[in-house]
Image (cartoon, rainbow, N blue to C red):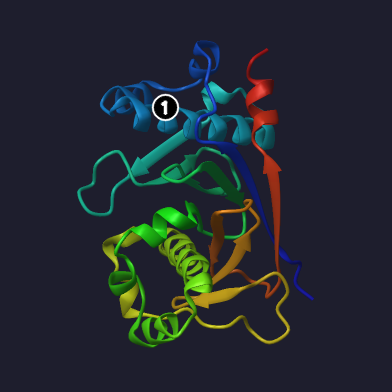
């Protein structure tokens, strides 16, 4: 029997401060990107990249500043978009999210991965149901009572966003063109599937939030997601 697919996820509050000493692990491209962003977005970007470098340094046994990272946008070819790890003999797949209430980093060796965390109220306040949901999903959503609709919409949003990140397209692909499906019979740790061989698991990210992680083409039907507090990784970079 194949071993379960393991995905590690680290989270930190979006307002977590990064010290100047911690920020020294960033490379020139990351500093340039942060410098081009408005202050709130720049702080989240720096937090995400410092956390990612700390996680990979622990996993690979190297200094955070020596971790090779590359990003490329599927739309314009610019130095943003999906992040890839360059250098280790075994490929490590990573994903970041920094737009919601938490900054999160996902890591696995099983295959391309995506992660997303959002505020349920923020998703509910945005007019996303018509562009997010397939016709069948939209009909089901409109039949829900109001108290359940907000959480359900946020759950679909993060599942689809995570799946599209795993596929490498992001929202270039139309999320309303397809529907999430139920997990395969007998699969453990899987909450939904997406077209293209993507499995999705929900994350426990606290009240008022929704989170999900997705993996493309895992060899095993079972998925183990290990959620960890990213503050311990950041604290290790203070010394």
In the rendered view, does 208 fall on the left or right side of 76? Answer: right
203, above or below 187, in the image: above
| Residue 168 appears in the rendering | no
Q: Looking at the image, which residue is at 50% across and 58% down?
A: 112
Quarter assignment of residue 44:
top left
Q: Looking at the image, which residue is at 36% across and 58% down?
A: 125
Quarter assignment of residue 199:
bottom right
Q: Looking at the image, which residue is at 40% across and 38% down?
A: 70
Q: The N terminus is located in which quarter?
A: bottom right
59, above or below 125, in the image: above
10 Å crowding of disc 1: few (<14), some (14-19), many (20+) = some
Residue 87 in percent (x, y) is at: 52, 37
In the image as oriented, which residue stretches furthest toward the right? 1
Which of the two residues, 143 or 189, is positioned nearer the viewer here? 143
In the image as oriented, which residue stretches furthest toward the front? 146
Q: Circle 1 is placed at which residue position?
A: 43
In the image as oriented, which residue stretches furthest toward the left? 76
Which of the two residues, 157 or 145, is positioned nearer the viewer here? 145
Q: The C terminus is located in which quarter?
A: top right
204, above or below 69, in the image: below
């Amino acid at each position: 029997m194949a071993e379960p697919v393991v995905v590690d996820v680290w989270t930190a509050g979006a307002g977590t401060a990064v010290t100047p000493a911690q920020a020294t692990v960033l490379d020139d491209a990351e500093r340039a990107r942060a410098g081009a962003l408005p202050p709130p977005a720049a702080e989240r970007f720096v937090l995400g990249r410092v956390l990612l470098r700390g996680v990979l340094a622990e996993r690979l046994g190297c200094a955070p500043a020596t971790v090779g990272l590359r990003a490329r946008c599927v739309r314009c070819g610019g130095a943003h978009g999906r992040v890839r790890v360059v250098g280790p003999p075994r490929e490590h797949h990573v994903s970041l999210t920094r737009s919601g209430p938490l900054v999160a980093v996902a890591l696995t060796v099983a295959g391309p991965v995506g992660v997303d965390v959002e505020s349920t109220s923020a998703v509910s306040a945005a007019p996303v149901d018509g562009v997010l949901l397939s016709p069948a999903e939209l009909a089901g959503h409109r039949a829900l009572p109001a108290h359940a609709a907000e959480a359900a919409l946020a759950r679909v949003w993060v599942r689809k966003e995570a799946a599209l990140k795993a596929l490498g397209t992001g929202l270039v692909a139309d999320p309303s063109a397809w529907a999430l499906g139920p997990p395969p019979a007998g699969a453990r740790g899987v909450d939904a599937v997406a077209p293209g061989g993507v499995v999705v698991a929900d994350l426990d990210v606290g009240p008022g939030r929704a989170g999900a992680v997705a993996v493309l083409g895992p060899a095993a039907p079972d998925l183990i997601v290990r959620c960890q507090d990213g503050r311990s990784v950041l604290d290790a970079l203070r010394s």
